[in-house]
Each structure stands twice: as structure tokens, then as C-alpha cells.
Image (cartoon, rainbow, N blue to C red):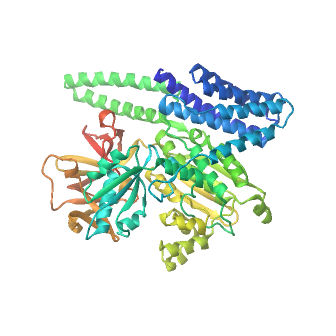
Amino acid sequence: MNDEYLDAFIRESEEAITELNNSLLDLESDPEDTEAMDRIFRTAHTLKGNFGAMGFEDAANLAHAIEDLLDAIRQGEMSVTPEIMDLVFAGVDEIETIVGQIEAEGEAHAETDDIVAELRAALEAGGAGGDADEAATSAAAGETTDETNSDTGPSPNGDLPDIEPERVTEGVVRATVDIGESDMAGVDSMLAIEAIEGACTLIDSIPDRDRIEDGDYEGAFDVFVDAADPATVQATLDDIGKVERVSTSDVTAAVEAAASAAGGEADGGAVVESGETDAADEDAEDALDVVEEQSAVQEIKSVRVDVGQLDDLHGLVEQLVTSRIKLRRAVEDRNIDTAGDSLNELDKITASLQNTVMDMRLIPLKNVVGKFPRMVRDLSRELDKDVDFEIVGEDIELDRTILTEISDPLMHIIRNSLDHGIEPPAEREAVGKDPTGSLELRASRERDHVIIEVEDDGAGLDVDAIRRKAAEKGVRSSEELETMPDSAIYDLIFHPGFSTADEVSETSGRGVGMDVVHDTVSQLDGTVDVDSTPGHGTTVTLRLPVTMAIVKVLFVEVGDEEYGVPLKNVDEITRTGEVTTLDGREVVRHNEEIYPVIDLGATFEVPGETKNGDSMLVRVRSSERQVALRCDAVKSQEEVVVKPLEGILSGTQGLSGTAVLGDGNIVHILDVVTL
């Protein structure tokens, strides 16, 4: 099958699914909305035709069953009820799963017979004057029973940490690591963990990382990495120093079974809202994880370009060619004045070219937030809450990369507002509020930044509870906490100390995953702030750059080479005088923490003589990676256009891309995470 056609089919199907979900929500809120019904029917009909044309018959049959059911509703033969809508949404979810399989594997293998039979049964019951709601409810109950009775199987190696399925891309391999006898178990374990991170994607560990690096474990510790093959992980870890024995096993099935059976825990701990809030029951917690997994926004792989932009681009290229010819002739004629004019002209053209191309990478926010209304609908039903969700400014544009990265943080914030911010209808009525909660996502443009606000009218944050928890965790001293203003107290919810399993049962309030939100936004050179009024609600504000193409970097010199370190990764620059040797490895201490030193000269086998004594250290932010980079000299800071590595260089460990400097030299930009 032609890859170009398949890719166009996938992109069009994804857009149609989002449009179908949102139109179904409009119909559910107003069964008399004929425009929504027309949109729904057109979209379902298009999906059916596209699946059939591409040869995916099972998917076409499913889309056909949905279309027939919707047609019965449009003809007045059936009513719009929660049960019928649940069944239709389930069918749409199955279609979305099929599209995902086609994108990943080029074919679909999902079983659609059961959901098609349920849709047909509901259609027959409704069309014959029977109880379509009862048919839909019975079908859903049967489906639940099948899932409950499925054989999940136990974990082959004992306890497992709570691993969210969306964090896994290939599989989960457990590696039991024994460093053997050591006089400095904590340091050796820390070095082993860092080596594992350099070779694999680390998901979790038992015990937690802090305990491992303190040497607080008996015999061996377990790490869980994202990989498909235990043998490959085994071979990789066997080559790591400071590790005496390693055993590996595939625990993917056990992790999936645990997530399915337990529904997962909330993503870390949280902060208590104003007033007394009971912990959500197990069904609601399960709903949180399921809804988040279904609503995960994947990387945006295509953009639509306005014809006017293409015309502008073509015009600029024509000017570029003309200027190049002028410059060549001026150089050949040794006419300095003409060459200078041509260079000035080239400078203007390239600036316009850069702006045009950057604009072409911009994508409307609706490509990400378009799926949120469906997520809010499903989660609100599971939590027994009534919520009006509104999106303002969905046409605001952001760079493709930023949109992809920001989707999960926005999802975290919205889930927290629903689960822990907005109260149940009875509680809201008891304090004189409208039983239906309000949740709004607003986006606006301010020069070269986009402001995204998520506001709810829920219980708000409990400042006293945050102060107590911060004191208990040692985030701040009690004296300091007492003098901090409320705005500063709110910011403490971004501290990782508020995301521990202990706090889920103790506080069960806002803050779930907020450290992840903060870290992601910071990596994008953005900021996140929280404002809350107890009893009236909370607003989380994200400030993000429109584009990531231009990055400010710190240039460092190593031997005869020059490298760029993204300034957002840099925490401090010092001399190497404080470097000490610990267990045969150079380290530097900062705030009682140990930062291993990475010698850039040795890492990249830099030609030329490097400084061994009077050199410099660039300490990386601990949120990125707890290391310090040794270089000969720190030169300057400059904004550069970073071009990702492509072809055989793509994925090179320690490098994220290249930048061309004003003198024509090419500088490699470091990736401190994989270095």
C-alpha cells in the first residue's frame, strides 16, 4: 500500500474521529441539535467510506453499524440517551484504536464483532419499539464481565511499582541488579543507575531511587526499563561497571494486568483542597487512568500549509537565487561595494525565509485540545459530577513540537480540576453554588508567547494544608513557610515532594502530576503559575514560547572543538577546583548532592590538547540530569537556529542537533540527558 496514501488516510481519520467525538458531545447536550446530527452523520459516513476504500473491512463494518444507529436517531426511531451515547462512544473509541494500529503496523487486528453486535442489538431493540437502553446496558455489562474474567496472570518476580501504561512504548523489563560487596554501596549504586539511564529508558525502581543511592537496600535492587527484549537489556547491563550480577525478565503482561485490575493509583500525591474532601472511590481512580490513556495525544506528524505561505516561500526562494547570482558575480569582479549590497539583500531574504518557515510549523491549539471535551465528558460521568467545559482561543497557533509536548501537562491539569477541584453536585449546593461546575481552557497570544489558562470554580487550594505538608516533607522550614505569601505557597505544589504515594491517601487533593507539568513547561522555556481562592476555584496559567526553532545556548570550548549547551539546562558555571575523586570517579558536590563529572574532551574524543588543570565546569540543572560537564573554557551566549540531526546521525547519543554560526562554522548542540 502506498505509504503516502496511507499517511493521508490516517491523518484524515484522526481529524474525523475528533470531529465526531465533539459533535456527539454537542448532540448529547442538546438532542434537538440538528446541525450536530448532520455533522455526525456526514463524518461517520466518510469514515465508513474511507475504511472500505483502503481495504479495512472490519473497521468499515463498525463504522457502518455506528452510521445505521445514528441514522435511526436522526429519523426519530430512537432517542438520545446516556446508554445509547455510551455505546456509540465505545464504537468510536474502537475506531480510534484501529487507526492507531494501522499507523503503527500498517494493518488492523482489533476484534470488532462484539461491539458491532452490541450496536446492531441496540438498533434492533430501538427500531422494533423495544428497550434500546436496556439492550445497550446489557451489552456493556457483558463486555465488562468478559474483561473482568480475563486471565491477567501474576507478576513473575514479585512486587511491581505502579507503572502507567502510557509511559511504556515497547515493553517493561525488570532487571535485578547486584553490585556485590562495596565499601560505598550508595555511590556505586548511583553510578550504576546513571549508566543504566544512559543505555535504557528508566521507568521506575524498587526501592525508590533515593534509597538506592543512599545504599538503603538489602543485596540487590530492581530497575524497570522500557524495552521489548530482556536479552538485549541483559547484554547492555552486563557491560556496565560496578555491577556484579544482573538478571532480567519481561514483566510487560504483569504491568498491564496490574493497571487493568487496580485501575492504577493517582499520579503521585497531592495537596488538600479547601474543605473536607473524601478520597475518590476505586472506580473513579480507575476512570482517571483509563481516560488519560485513551485521550493521550500522540506526536503531530503533519501540518497543513496555506497556499499563500507556499507562494511567499516560492517568491523568497526566487529572490534567494537572484541574490546568489549577484553575489557570485560581485566576488568574481572583486566589486566590494556590490558584494556588500548583495550580502545585505541576502540578510533580509534569509530573515524573511526564516519567519515564513517558522510560521509554516505553527499549528492551531485545537489539534491538541480537540480531544479534551470527550475526556471531560467521560471523566465527569465516572466521578458523578456535572461539569460545563469550554475552550476559548483554540485557533491560537503554536510550534508543532511545543504542541506535542504540552498535551500531557494540560491533560494533567484538567484531570486534577475534575477530580480534586470541582466538588460533587451535593457539596456545591450545600455551599450555595450551582450544582454544575465550570471548567474553562483559555488561550491568547502575547507577542512571541502564548498564554494558556485552565480555570475551575471548585474548592480552591488549602493554603494551611500546603504549609503543613511542606513542613512535614522538609520542603521549607516552618519559620519560612509562615512568612511566605499565599502565591509562593501555591507554587510549592510543583515540588516533587508533593508527589509521593503516601500523600494520595492522606490528602487526595490538587497536585497530582503537577511536578511533571512544571518540568515539561520549564524544558520548553515556559513558566507555570497557580492562583487560587479558597471556596471559589483555581487557575493554572502556562506561558509558552510560540516556537522552539531558536534556542539560546552557552558556547563551550574543548580542545579544538566548540559545543553549545542549551542555556535552559545550565544551573551554574564554576572552576574545577572543587572536583574530588570518589571511588575512582571525579565528582563535584553541590548542596550535599554528588554530581559526577563528564569530561567532554574524552567523551567526544576531541582532537587537540585539552586543559587538565585550569578548566571549567558547567553544572546541569538537577531536573534535567545530575551531572557536571568539564570543558576548557566558557565563551559566550547566543541565540541560534538548531537543526535536528538527520539520517544516520539521527539519535546520536549526547547530541540534539547542529547550529550554523555567523562565521559559517557548524557547532554541535549537546543533549545533556543522553550525554
Residue 661 vs residue 222: left or right?
left
Rendered view: 107 above or below 499? above
Q: How many marks?
A: 0
Image coordinates of residue 632 in percent, x first then y, are: 20, 55
Image coordinates of residue 188 in percent, x first then y, are: 28, 64
Residue 433 vs residue 509: left or right?
right
Q: Residue at x 27, y 63 (%)?
A: 574
Q: Quick one: 579 or 3, which is closer to the camera?
A: 3
Q: Is residue 375 visible?
A: yes
Q: Residue at x 63, y 25 (%)?
A: 60
Rendered view: 58 above or below 578? above
Image coordinates of residue 219 in percent, x first then y, are: 34, 66
Most distant residue in the left direction: 609
Q: Residue at x 20, y 64 (%)?
A: 584
Most distant residue in the bottom direction: 479
Q: Quick one: 51 or 8, which is closer to the camera?
A: 51
Residue 31 occupies quadrant: top right
Residue 461 occupies quadrant: bottom right
Image coordinates of residue 42 in percent, x first then y, are: 70, 26
Residue 342 vs residue 375: left or right?
left
Q: Is residue 675 visible?
A: no
Q: Quick one: 629 or 663, which is closer to the camera?
A: 629
